[in-house]
Amino acid sequence: TARHLGAGGRGEIVVAFTVAWATTHIADLGISTSGRISLLRPNGDVGLPDVVSLTVVLLPFQLVLSSVAVVVLSMTSLHLSHSLLVGTVVLSVATMMFNSAKSLFYGLRRYRDVLVAEACLAAFHLMALAVLLVSSRLTSTSAVAMMAVGYGVCSVWLVWDSGVAKHGLRSWRVTHWRQLVLDGLSPMAGGTAVFVALRVDRLLLPLIAGTHVLGIYSVALAIPEALRILPHSVGQVIADRGRSHIDTVAESRRHTRIFVVAHVLVLAIAALVGWVLLPVVFGTSFVESRDVLVIVVAAEAVLSIHLMHQALLVGFARPKGLGVPQVVGAVAVVALDLVMIPRWGIQGAAWAALTGYSIMALVST
């Protein structure tokens, strides 16, 4: 999409995904976290039907919320097409479906199934984009639509594979819905806050400097954000092993320290390789992204410290402690972005991210 659509098209796609994930964090009400923790609890009362049925009930809320978001966007200076705005709404609903289904399988500790599903999803997305490109139909709207189709199909596959759909509506129970929502409020607030901390620059940059600048910035973030799957995956296992009483607190802390050191080394190597390959892979029009590459990679290294401490809180059943560092970090990043982006553009966004992530890591520690 970057090479064919240019920085502007790339920026439009980033805006669509930003809206999709922002609304998912809110409409989800934290059920993806509270449900996973409840499913991991030995001999717990909450079952698969409880989590799935509540998630299905919340999908219309996501539809309304994302629709409101795109209406607001249509009134700004972004000038996004109506078809792209509609595609963004569909992508938002599909994103919530996929995120909830994936969290469900994490709660069942079926990591291999998630890996297979995501590998198939990636292959589908690549083939779909290739077909669109060859047929000269690749646009921002068609790319977003294909992403939505992939997420939707994959989420239905995961839910069906879990076995809960075979029992139909008869297995739905509302008994534990209230507890799931109450347990999910703090993670929802924290998740929304950390999303703001990580993604608010994706909305401010296009509003202030245009989608072209956002496209260049997103390419700089491609390397560190691609590697973010490592702390998320390792943190997931650390949390689940702690919640299942397999590891002690001391053992889990030792694992997090070892991982952070290894992750910093991986990021350093990736930054060196990315410096050379970014203009080769994405095209010379994106060469400006190298100006902030080192800064955003350093920010990602600091963020991994925060993510590891969040995993410890989840693993040892302290979900109410998840929100504080995330809210503090979100406030700091928003304030820094509002001051630095209008003055320094991409450089300001990168330095604001590094400073804000450092605050999040400090508060988490």
Image (cartoon, grey):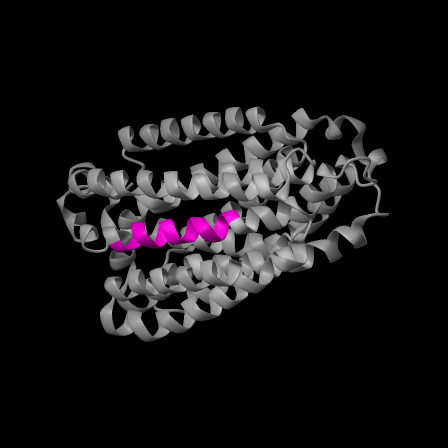
Helix, strand or loop for the magenta stretch, by majority: helix
Residue at 57 percent across and 54 percent down: it is: 25
Q: Is residue 165 magenta?
A: no
Q: Is residue 135 left or right of residue 357?
A: left
Q: Quadrant of residue 126?
A: top left
Task: Return the residue found at the far front.
Answer: 250
Q: Is residue 339 left or right of residue 321?
A: left
Residue 207 percent coordinates (x, y): 34, 67
Q: Is residue 296 above or below residue 273?
A: below
Q: Is residue 67 above or below residue 251?
A: below
Residue at 27 percent across and 28 percent down: it is: 134
One can see residue 351 in this view: yes
Residue at 64 percent across and 39 percent down: it is: 248
Q: Quadrant of residue 203?
A: bottom left
Q: Is residue 299 magenta?
A: yes
Residue 82 percent coordinates (x, y): 42, 55
Task: Return the residue found at the far left.
Answer: 284
One can see residue 79 in this view: no
Q: Nearer the viewer, residue 32 or 264?
A: 264
Q: Is residue 54 left or right of residue 258?
A: right
Q: Nearer the viewer, residue 40 or 242?
A: 242
Q: Nearer the viewer, residue 343 or 316?
A: 316
Residue 87 percent coordinates (x, y): 46, 48
Residue 48 percent coordinates (x, y): 75, 35
Residue at 37 percent across and 55 percent down: it is: 81
Task: Give the magenta-colored segment's residue range.
Answer: 295-308
